[in-house]
Image (cartoon, rainbow, N blue to C red):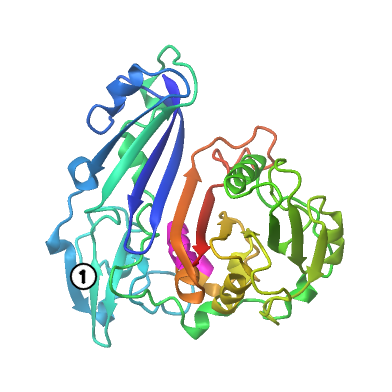
Amino acid sequence: MAPVEIELGWDSPHARHRDRYYFEHVDLANDRFPADLGSQLQDRSAGESAQLDILFDDWQEQYQQNLIRTLPREQFRRRSKHPLPPVIPRTGRFYPRRFVSEAIEMDRDANWPLRCLQAGERELRIDLNHPLAGRHLNVQATLLGETQPGRDQGDTPGDILAACTGNGPGMQASLADTDTDFFSAEAFRRIDEAGDSEFYTSPRLVQHLDATCREHIQMFYGRFLQPGMRVLDLMSSWVSHLPAEPTDIDVHGLGLNAQELQANPRINDSTLQDLNQDSRLPFDDAAFDAVICTASIEYLIQPLAVVKEVSRILKPGAPFVITFSDRWFPTKAIQLWSELYAFERMQLVLDYLRLGGRFEQLASESLRGWPRPADDPYIEQLDDADPLFAVWGTKKC
């Protein structure tokens, strides 16, 4: 038995992706790994890795052409007892299978996703294949601790690849030749349409993410930082989630509450601005070496305009790095955010970068499965720490 992190690396038409999953207890001899990955790990020491390249279909679900279906549009219906507005199927989006339960055989969970490949006026073309079907994966397994004596098999994941890929990976990839229909007018409406400056009148000097997730964000941002950089913390607050090193970066915070910004020990100067009222950033062209945005992208009602501005103020080759989790203020987030699957939100943010600014080398990363801190107030309700989702790209030279 040992703690193991599994990393899946794969490419889609517009980006490269990495999905990481932590398992606290893996039975290296009996849990099912692709090919000989498990036996390779048994010969490794703590901190060492084993990896291999596989076709997802060879180890999980094969891509099947007969799972591409065409059905009358009226057979797509929300199944709910609540008085919610009807769901409008849109090209490229994912939806629960229960929405078409009368048109297909329900051979798996009703919330398992299907993809709408094309939304016509009278017909829908849908894909019932796994979101990773047909994709080549680089699977890397890393021992994160010493091997310990075995325990009850029920305490282990069983099928490693199934546990990593059964709840989201693949949905961050856009279609090869068709843009996903994310940008309808209603998608960017909010429950609370009042100005954000009113909502943030009082400072909120509290942590919105658990300590484990915050630590992972800090380590993640550390990959992009170098001494002497000038960094913009976009939509900042009283904490910037930056690592302790390097210490000599010049951080500018742009946010909505003066007291929060004044309490932030990492920023050197600040700007008060509501980007939903004015998306123009008050900085010169090519003024920054990096821009970060933490747990805030879901509040932008004009994201493409803001991303265009970010690309303007970045130096060529500089990164724009966006991180988020599964917590937000529901009344202020855009309507679309709550309608998407967690991994599908990364697809949305990748489209912001792809369509809104001059960005290249687009990438996404997820990190899940770490235990929630023992002193966290939600430890009785939630076993896992808040997940980390990240999207980034570099300004074209």
Residue 177 magenta-highlighted:
no
The residue range painted magenta reads 337-350
What residue is disc 1 on?
103
Q: Nearer the viewer, residue 46 or 360?
A: 360
Residue nearer the viewer, 328 or 358: 358
Main secondary structure type of the part rendered in magenta: helix
Q: Amino acid at mark 1?
A: Ala
Q: Nearer the viewer, residue 8 or 67?
A: 8
Q: Is residue 157 left or right of residue 34?
A: right
* SS of the residue under disc 1: loop
State the residue at coordinates (44%, 42%).
20
Rendered position, 288 above or below 3: below
Quadrant in the picture for the N terminus: top left
Q: Position of residue 352 (x, y in %)?
A: 50, 71
The answer to whether 8 is drawn above or below residue 303 in the figure is above
Residue 75 falls in which quadrant of the image? bottom left
x then y, percent, for residue 78: 37, 72
Q: Position of residue 366 (x, y in %)?
A: 47, 49
Left or right, 246 with respect to 362, comes to right
